[in-house]
Image (cartoon, rainbow, N blue to C red):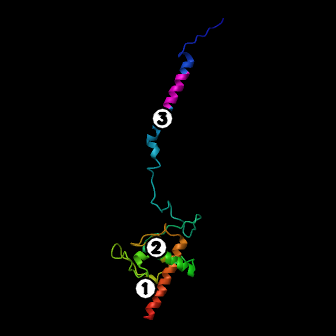
Amino acid sequence: MVKVFRHHAGTGSHGRVWSRVILSLGLGLFCATFAHALPWNDDMYWQPELEAGTAARPPVADSVPTTGIEPPMSSRITERIKAGLRVRNPAEPTPQSIQNGEGLFRIYCAMCHGEQGRGDGQMVGKVVPSSDLHTERIRNQKDGYLYATIRSGGLVMPAYQHALSTTERWDLVNYVRHLQQQGARRDQSQ
């Protein structure tokens, strides 16, 4: 017995296959077009976040970062005093370091602290008060305290962590010490 297959356009198994393909393509195109509006696409945007400059967990005491990034340092006075006790100045006060520090001081510090560090800069009285870097209180602070203050800021002083490299901050410390020595010599001669 021989069976005869009749082909009718749009009917039979071939027609169903093509209609499924077209339906799948249309549905896929529709989904691809509007998938960005689905609620799970902004999960990364609405996730919990930390403030810039903070870490998920504090570093282990006395640990050294492998990335070369300095550990977090607070601008609180107690933290700056602690930094003064544990952070040592690795930069020798060479003429080159002092010269670099002088240039940086003129750019970042003189506006408030004045050219000689006497707290008489152009901004004093207009915007913020400023410290006289020649006072006994500041002269008696350790280099690590000055470094921490430059890096993390103070009560009204902004932080220069992102503006200055570690070497530049230490050059500034060396220049401030140089200014203080010059000021002490001037005071003694008068």
Mark 3: which amino acid? Cys
- Say which quarter of the image contains residue 154: bottom left
**Of helix, strand and loop, which mostly describes the magenta segment?**
helix
Mark found first going from the N terminus, 2 or 3:
3
Q: Is residue 23 magenta?
A: yes
| Residue where numbered disc 2 is placed | 107
Contact, CB < 8 Å: mark 3 with mark 1? no
Question: Viewed as shown, does residue 60 lie left or right of 75?
Answer: right
Q: Is residue 103 magenta?
A: no
Residue 136's disc number: 1
- Say which quarter of the image contains residue 88: bottom right
SS class, disc 3: helix
Circle 3 Cα neighbour tier, 10 Å, few/some/many (<14 / 14–19 / ≥20): few
List x then y, in percent, for residue 190.
Answer: 42, 94
Magenta-tinted stretch: 17-27
| Residue where numbered disc 3 is placed | 31
Compared to 87, does 37 lie above or below? above
Circle 1 Cα neighbour tier, 10 Å, few/some/many (<14 / 14–19 / ≥20): few
Could you give the CA–CA distance between mark 2 and mark 3, rounded to whole angstroms? 56 Å
Compared to 116, does 188 lie above or below? below
Residue that sits furthest to the top in the current view:
1
SS class, disc 2: helix
